[in-house]
Image (cartoon, grey):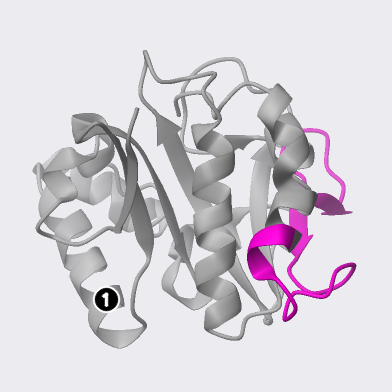
Amino acid sequence: MGRRLVPLTLDNLQDVPHRCRSCVFWELDPVSGEAAVKAGTAALEKEAWISAVLLDWGSCGRVVYVDDVPAGFVLYAPPAYVPRSTAFPTSPVSPDAVQLMTAFVMPGYQGQGLGRVLVQAVAKDLLRRGFKAIEAFGDARWKEPACLLPADHLLAVGFKTVRQHPTHPRLRLELRSTLSWKEDVEMALDRLLGAVQKEPALRPL
């Protein structure tokens, strides 16, 4: 089984699940997002957001393929590019962190460690770019697919709660705190995130 990770661009956006291609939960503030959905322009807004972030900041996502079939994706960006992040009771995201917005592993590919692979890909990218941490708003009561990641999954891959909340805690993964990343980034990530191999992959969101 061959796995391949590539940056998310407008060229491979069609490999993201259809409902995610037209979801602007994170990309627009609540009022603008609702207006885009009502006007039927959400997919265009999504493309515009990805294009703007790519031009201004750089890579903001990864798509994982298994035997050349799209199997999952992850989306992330600094909080300045994520208007919805300010709407949470546990906001704001720390200024030294990039926000892990959402991720999805396709049905049929869950339970294969792809959730860990996606988080590793984000961590590797952000380490190369000099960031200190990844933060995310978790869903402590996750029951079905949604735009937020399950808090228990984030905890399983090494995140720690930095601001508790009964529904939407904010969690943080320090990229340099406990291990010598410079010596061997691959080994460090395996040690930090290896425990998730025994956990389920990211549930569909």
Q: Amino acid at mark 1?
A: Leu
| Residue 111 shown in magenta | no
Residue 15 picture location, percent across and down: 18, 40
Question: Relative to residue 194, is residue 134 depicted above or below?
Answer: below
Asked if residue 105 can be seen in this view, the reply is yes
Residue 111 picture location, percent across and down: 54, 18
Q: Is residue 180 left or right of residue 22?
A: right
- Locate residue 185: give its quadrant: bottom right
**Residue at label 1?**
54
**Nearer-the-camera pick, 112 or 102:** 112
Q: Secondary structure at mark 1?
A: helix
User: Where the C terminus falls, by quadrant?
Assistant: top left
**Nearer-the-camera pick, 89 or 172:** 172
User: Where the N terminus falls, by quadrant?
Assistant: top left
| Residue 161 shown in magenta | yes
- Locate residue 127: give its quadrant: bottom right
Counting every numbered tag in the picture gives 1
Q: Residues within 10 Å of mark 1 (few under 14, many from 20)?
A: some
**Nearer-the-camera pick, 95 or 85:** 95
Residue 19 picture location, percent across and down: 24, 31
Question: Relative to residue 99, is residue 177 depicted above or below?
Answer: below
Query: Which residue is pictured at 64% across the width and 62% down the height?
Result: 186
Q: Where are the magenta residues, as a range?
A: 159-187
**Nearer-the-camera pick, 158 or 182:** 182
Query: Which residue is pictured at 60% across the width and 15% down the height?
Result: 143
Residue 150 picture location, percent across and down: 64, 31
Asked if residue 93 can be seen in this view, the reply is no
Query: Which residue is pictured at 54% across the width and 30% down the height?
Result: 202
Query: Which residue is pictured at 71% across the width and 59% down the height?
Result: 187
Q: Is residue 202 left or right of residue 60?
A: right
